[in-house]
Amino acid sequence: MVSFSSLFLRGDLRLVPRAAFALLIAFAMGSAQAAEPEAKCPAYTQLIPIEKLSSAKLRELNQLFSTVPEACLDESDFLEQRVRVALALGDITTAAIWAERRAMIDPESPAALMDYAWTARLSGQDFLARELITQVLERPDIPPGLRSQLIAWMDTPTKPQLRFLRGRTVVGASFGYESNLNNRPRNGEVALTFPTGDYVFQLDPSELARSGAVLTSYGQWASKIARGIEPIGDIRIVGQARQPMVGGSAFSTQAAEAHLGFDTQAIGLSPGGLPDRLWASIGQYGYGGRALLAAQSLGGSWVFEHGRPQGLSGLLSLGTRCASSPGFWLEGRRFNENPTNNSDIVGANYSFGCRNFDVRYGFDLFSLKDQARGGRLGGDIQRSGLTLSMQSARPYRELFGAWLPDFMAAGINWLGYLRLDRARDQEGYSDLLDFGSRRWMNGQTLGLQISAEMPKSGLTLFGRFERKLQKSNIAFFALESSLFSLGAEFRVD
């Protein structure tokens, strides 16, 4: 093991851990510490060897720190421990906050100043780090050898490195009943148009809608991307598998997606008309146990904050905040087994939403052109849609009274939505269907989800109902389905 003294004699401070570096400075300066008063905080808030703790134990300790008495916030040892735990978890922002507080309550401590300088340096605040090191250098009792090393360290330029902030992992599963597992029509009759007249054919039973139980599982990991302590973007990876209990794997679906987004100003791009946010995503989708298609997309969006809307009543607008976000995207879809369905999409969307106390409401509009690239029936497709949504969050006890046990004293969320969409082919779909006319489809979806988050556990229970109806001039595309499911979701930050 390399000792502090050998590193000090060799002048290689880069190899000294941050906490040890601060202690080395205090030791080298020969500062005599007065006897500490009796600790006001629990024993676990004092300095312990956190280097031996696992990530899970560190998170538990960090959560435990949030429950300590207020008097601990004035204890230098406690604050140093918080800095060390935050750095071990990769949370430089939190570490800088506690390091600053420690330096404020113990400004004469060189170790506290160096803690603060270290976190400032890690977060890309070189100017602040230089100021703090200068304060240490102004002390008359600093050894000459240490002075030269601090000056060299201070003058070494650093660039904030890209890193992931603390991410969030979500896994969940639901079980329920769906009336149309294979997205097929319920009507078994299809009219075909021939020169000699119309003929009605009966569809094979395998081509009709199947109903039954369905199990869905999913997982998601999301994190902010930061340069130093400044968030500049985000990343999200999602996977989902849906397995009906009838038909084996014939109706199963799978999806895997990765999304990456950046704030254009944060990454140094000139605003000059550019979107506030740029994003890209890739996805793979399967059906019936086979890879169905791959999709790649990129786009951008702007965000505009709005003041309080002036309604008929001042009470209605009190506390209301609104925002709107226009955007665009480009997407390419490539089918593995049927390349005639390949297409490129150009789309635009507009979102508007408000929050008033615990109620959120808004709408989303989109319009796109789905351009055929492989001789697809019907040619290009023009699609558009509107989604209206509203959601709220209220404590359990406000809804059901105080008879509920404490472990259920969580919040209930409800989400309701209505989605309307339409699609129009640019060419006749088939000469045998509806006299070769262009296909049209009008759809509507009505949904409601209620969820309850269990306190201090990361567990959320939810129930969901959704009803879909699609009308079309071609009977084969007239669809309807209902879904009811119950599930649980577990979140780890």
Image: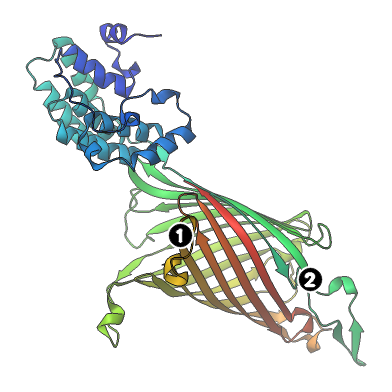
Question: Label 1 neighbourhood size at 10 Å, few (<14), some (14-19), many (20+)?
Answer: some
Is any part of residue 309 visible from this angle?
no
**Residue at 78% of width from left, 78% of height from top?**
185
Point out residue 445 in the picture as x, y percentages from the top left corner.
Answer: 61, 77
Would you say 66 lies left or right of 465 here?
left
**Residue at 71% of width from left, 79% of height from top?**
480
The answer to which of 278 and 40 lies nearer the viewer is 40
**Residue at 36% of width from left, 41% of height from top?**
227
Q: Is 13 drawn above or below residue 342 in the view shown?
A: above
Question: Label 2 neighbourhood size at 10 Å, few (<14), some (14-19), many (20+)?
Answer: some
Q: Is 492 drawn above or below residue 442 in the view shown?
A: above
Point out residue 484 in the picture as x, y percentages from the top left corner.
Answer: 66, 70
Q: Is 455 drawn above or below residue 6 in the view shown?
A: below
Is any part of residue 169 visible from this angle?
yes
Point out residue 335 in the picture as x, y percentages from the top left corner.
Answer: 72, 59
Residue holding disc 1: 410
Q: Is 123 drawn above or below residue 462 in the view shown?
A: above
Residue 188, by quadrant, is bottom right
Amino acid tagged 1: Ala
Most extreme residue toward the bottom is 197
Most extreme residue toward the front is 403
Point out residue 8 in the picture as x, y percentages from the top left corner.
Answer: 26, 10
Q: Secondary structure at mark 2?
A: loop
The answer to which of 441 and 77 lies nearer the viewer is 77
Labelled pair 2, 1 in contact (Cβ < 8 Å): no
Would you say 286 lies left or right of 192 here?
left
Residue holding disc 2: 211
The numbered mark, 2 or 1, whose residue comes first in the sequence reads 2
